[in-house]
Amino acid sequence: MQLIWMVPAAGLSGVVFALWLAWDVLRRDTGTDAMRDVSAMIFEGAMAFLKRQYRTIAMLALVTGVLIAVIVGAVSAGVKEIIRSDTGQVEYGATVVGHWREGLLTGIAFLVGAAASALAGFIGMYISVRSNARCASAATRSLKEAITVSLRGGAVSGFLVVSLSLLGVSSIFLTYSRLLGNPATIAPFLIVGFGFGASFVALFAQLGGGIYTKAADVGADLVGKVEAGIPEDDPRNAAVIADLVGDNVGDCAGRGADLFESMSAENIGAMILGVAIYTVTGKIEWIMFPLVLRSFGILATIVGLSSVPFFARDDGRQHPMTPLNYGYYIVSILSVVGLFIATRVMLSDVWYWFFGCGLIGIATGIAFVYITQYYTSGSWRPVQEIARASRTGPATNIIIGTAVGYETTAATAITIGLALVISFVLGSHADIANVPGFSSGVFGTAVATMGMLMSAAYILAMDTFGPITDNAGGITEMAGAPASARHITDSLDAVGNTTKALTKGYAVASAGLAAFLLFSAYLDKVKERLDIPLTQSLPIDLSNVDVFVGGLLGVMLVFLFSSLAIRAVGNTASAIIEEVRRQFREDPGIMAGTSRPDYARAVDITARASLRQMVAPGLLAVGMPVAVGLIFRFTRTEDSGWLAVSGLLMIGTIGGIIMATFLNNVGGAWDNAKKYIEAGKLTVESANPGETVVLGKGSDAHKAAVVGDTVGDPFKDTAGPSLHVLVKLLSTVTLVMAPLFIR
Amino acid sequence: MQLIWMVPAAGLSGVVFALWLAWDVLRRDTGTDAMRDVSAMIFEGAMAFLKRQYRTIAMLALVTGVLIAVIVGAVSAGVKEIIRSDTGQVEYGATVVGHWREGLLTGIAFLVGAAASALAGFIGMYISVRSNARCASAATRSLKEAITVSLRGGAVSGFLVVSLSLLGVSSIFLTYSRLLGNPATIAPFLIVGFGFGASFVALFAQLGGGIYTKAADVGADLVGKVEAGIPEDDPRNAAVIADLVGDNVGDCAGRGADLFESMSAENIGAMILGVAIYTVTGKIEWIMFPLVLRSFGILATIVGLSSVPFFARDDGRQHPMTPLNYGYYIVSILSVVGLFIATRVMLSDVWYWFFGCGLIGIATGIAFVYITQYYTSGSWRPVQEIARASRTGPATNIIIGTAVGYETTAATAITIGLALVISFVLGSHADIANVPGFSSGVFGTAVATMGMLMSAAYILAMDTFGPITDNAGGITEMAGAPASARHITDSLDAVGNTTKALTKGYAVASAGLAAFLLFSAYLDKVKERLDIPLTQSLPIDLSNVDVFVGGLLGVMLVFLFSSLAIRAVGNTASAIIEEVRRQFREDPGIMAGTSRPDYARAVDITARASLRQMVAPGLLAVGMPVAVGLIFRFTRTEDSGWLAVSGLLMIGTIGGIIMATFLNNVGGAWDNAKKYIEAGKLTVESANPGETVVLGKGSDAHKAAVVGDTVGDPFKDTAGPSLHVLVKLLSTVTLVMAPLFIR
């Protein structure tokens, strides 16, 4: 099979490139003693948190893995051979994998997926927290060097996530098909556990990290800026290290796990969709195509990322976002080339349809970059509108902010809708299988999703850029570095805020596209059990009461999950506030600057509180689809279980995408409305006609904007990102648990 | 046919009872000259607004009515006869109503529905604004008399809405079947325009009124309490009359129109569902049952409402809510009796299954009364949690409030889900039609909806009770009445807040139940066009890309519509603030109390601004389903138009119900958290151990709670209630426009 050698080549190249980047970052100067000191504290705190978090997650994952093996083993009917029948349909033959064996393999795949996701998150974050002091040190010299360090540090995480996902999926596929002697057609069904394992870890990583980061942020601000009247990142605030640790564990580890699972789950789902086409056409390429396309994505990203330093100029006039944008263009152009080669070589004479689908996906990724910027950057109407509303106080800031946030869902829904319909139509035109009633449209949406995810490593690198520069800023402040360095880290920090917002938009869009194909994969599993040909459609009737009520519960799950995530931040923040107050009260030397606060204790309390708080929403997300499936299965008709789950999955996904868009964008917009005012851009007419007064930092309008910013924190960094993961977890948990819902 | 005489009898009894109540209220003492003066200003303002609003709505409705006649006439294939085929299925025969005639009849039905809804709203509000001074005057004498006046004033609106809906639907049904000589089986399809007309008026009435009331409220508060530092309802504030006018036009006229359409649309939908069963069983009772059941509801409510004064005690210890609750119990018990008689007599030997369905509906209504109280009253955890969060400022008040608001959707979704599934199961058991594949389950959910709506007049009376007592409080304040009277109106006002919240919960629940049956009615229309037997199911496949994208756009519509509604309040409030500031600036005598502000001008400006602002969300709601249907019809496959609309309708409905629940409940909870603090119930530990300090009115916690309250205003009184209407409008607009979406 042509091009398949690309998969190990690109996967290993990605890892090697990541290692080179890590070596390049680690060999750099770590700055002054003070910088090293702060960085060491952040490192310790982050590692302590990760250790504790991974211990919790490992325990939960182990239990879940065993449960999966037992449940799937007990309730499944085994995996059936996939054959082409006399009527030309793709049907199921004899059972080729016994049900206990299926359970065991699924459970193992789950644990491997969970371990790979955790590993990628861990290594990425290790380098990220090692990069912050180096970035701070570089900032004392030049902007260009600081960008290079932070982007390379971030890219380590990006490349490891993407490469480990690719290597993980392809090697477990290889093991389960070649080594264990299963047909290539059924191996994709056996490895669905890998996707579930990845999303399981992602959910808890994102929840725990998201709660930690925002609780520390809100807590440090409320007790420091508001109560004690000391500036941000002031070393007298005991929560300041926890705040800096939070940037890493939330944005870096969380988003990495999020995209790891996006890619893995989408990859496996696309392979499942390829099975039917392979069975008809006899060309294994239809199953392997997703792996190859991603390989091209990695290579494109290596080139694009390496090009960034060449675009960076040190003349003080270039916006730091500019070289990053150029790099992204290069990645996009090379992705188009890779897409062309992969489709042309692998998808025989219908390649152009799927080339079109892939282009749609790449275009969707770019569209989201612009949509997110429009809604969350101070240069356009939405953020300015919120800033103006702040003049009449916090209430109007919140009201108009909410209105803007709700509005942003329109562009998201329309773009995702267009991408789905167009790629579906293009895919259907290919008409590969030539089976009456079968449509390759869904495979078209799968190619679009893959096209979009080709640039994932680059997007992740930009995302992790955020916490590194944010940390570098904090280190510069705490280590008393020169103002010029602080100026550089500030400008990088602002760029980091933008790139973090972009990544979230990208993650939402990929979740929206992937949902559709994962749902089809779930239906393929149901068809197996009900002995319905793979190439026949299995309608999920929306006017069926079970589907409708399942959908109602799905949207409700989105709201309830958001409620728990938001409240978790509030609860954890209270714990931090109590601790900082206690330290101020018990040691007056802290405020005077003569004694050093007990940072470690604050870090530890935040870690413990946030890990406690992540359990309830996490279990809700995993447990509710299973509970709904079981309740409907046992109290209603034969088909009610899997039908209710279908409704919950699909309609919950729609609700989740829209809600995540709102939460992410409104938070970003509130944040930047505050920054807009701080930059002195908000004015009012003064009493003297023709004159205007600037409402800057410290004005009532600014105070109102700070309220909005604080409200937006748990929205955009805890609930919103956790919802992307929830949406994908719904797909993977139902895919693995499908046999449980069928009577 | 047995019991059908009940319909005119109950409808006319309702009208006569309403007239008697109106006479009873109007003959009462109108208080002091000052009271009469204020009341006259409110009356003038309200009538001026209504006149202007109805002129706008009438124009829009006329244009829409003509468009409907033309469009349906042009694209429909006419209405076909409904017959029983040899296979036992209910099928379509020859065309019995030509397509132009169908268009004309539908257009006329639309205009009649619109006119009836407007009439009910107008008369109800006329009495309501005539009752306020009489309630204020009664409050100078006794609590019992004040309750009686305000409840009877509110009941005029309640009974007129319910009776006019019943009489309207039944007489247009009679006209279109008997007088015009159409079979009883197709008449329900001809009168769907009535429901659309009702929801069309309801949408604009609720939007315009909702924007007006909250813009006036927020504007008066911001400019009066915050800027000028004068108390609420202070006569020096030029916006104070506009604020009092707003209570009437938003809560009274808006909610009346909302429930008018609920009942009309649900009634027509249920009749459509009855057609298939009638054709099989030959018993016309299956079509007429909804009308009869509602007749029993009116009679039950007349008795229940008349009983309230007997439960009211004037000993100063009875909570004013208590007699209202007793009255509701009586209505519920009598409804059960009426349900028993109606099902027993009309639904032959399967009556007990539907009796069960109706019980489920009545129980759902009662459940929502308790759920709403739990989440929005200061006696329980949720509101107290928000009050406690106010201690750390407005940001935590908003964060925890949002978390609580999201949480409230769980109880709503589970209750509606249970009600739907159980009534569906009970309905299916009846197995009336005895046609293979046909289920009478949906008819079961229809009976549940009807059972719930039996108490609608009582709920509406309690709702309108709110603005009357609110107005009476304002009049008492402005007219300088004794403190004892103000005390009585204050306690009634608090009850009014609770009853207003209950009505919204009730409206959401009825929307949720009704959606399912209206969707089935829409599918019956589609089946007619596609020549699929009525008794056969027509699956709407959720994994179809058109359905999925339609659903994505449906949930997006809910968010975008909320955005526009919320922003409209902000924009209108700015207009009011400008005007009040201008009056303060240009006439210093106003602040000194020597000259009277120009109330009329403030009222007028508010009216014009809010009516301008209602157009965009209104047109979005009506236009988007039509646009989506047309775009998918013309750019995609044969079936894409009606499939995408199905997705938009059903999934948009789910999103709308959940979102409306959030907006209504979070607003109520924020409001009552503020009241909880004002009542002195929030405490903190003081520096001296064991001592506690009360954080009451004027504390920082109170200021934070005021921010939440202000944010909640447009949520709970503009966007939330408008969403209920949107949800039902989606059903009626798609029902009428169905032929347009089918190729």
Image: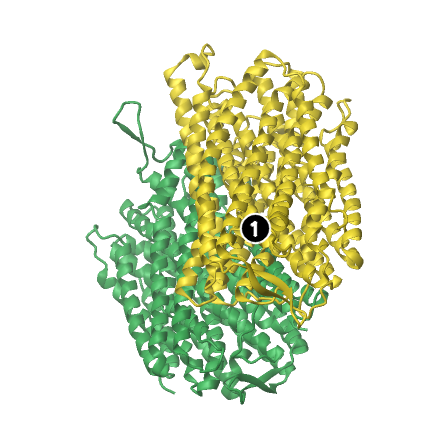
Chain colours: A yellow, B green
Q: Is residue A140 left or right of residue A115?
A: right
Badge 1 sits on which subunit?
A: A
Q: Position of residue A131 (x, y in %)?
A: 62, 23
Above or below, B737 relative to A75: below
Identify the residue position indicated by label 1 in the image. A192
Above or below, B433 relative to B635: below
- Residue B723 visible, this orientation: no
Q: Is residue A437 left or right of residue B381?
A: right
Q: Secondary structure at mark 1?
A: helix
Q: Position of residue A508 (x, y in %)?
A: 61, 46
Above or below, A610 relative to B273: above
Q: Residue furthest left?
A: B315
Q: Nearer the viewer, residue A716 or B288?
A: A716
Q: Position of residue A642 (x, y in %)?
A: 49, 61
**Measuring 74% from the left and 43% from the top, which residue is drawn there?**
A6
Q: Nearer the viewer, residue B423 or B104?
A: B423
Q: Is residue B116 left or right of residue B550?
A: left
Which quadrant is home to the N terminus of chain B?
bottom left
Q: Residue furthest top?
A: A594
Q: Nearer the viewer, residue B433 or B604?
A: B433
Which quadrant is home to the C terminus of chain B?
bottom right
**Measuring 57% from the left and 13% from the top, which residue is drawn there?**
A34
Q: Position of residue A343 (x, y in %)?
A: 77, 52
- Residue A292 visible, this orientation: yes
Amino acid marked by disc 1: Val
- The total number of labels drawn is 1
Structural crowding at the residue carrying mark 1, measured as other residues with C-alpha within 10 Å and reported as few (<14), some (14–19) or many (≥20): many
Q: To which quarter of the image does residue B392 belong?
A: top left
Q: Is residue B268 left or right of residue A150?
A: left
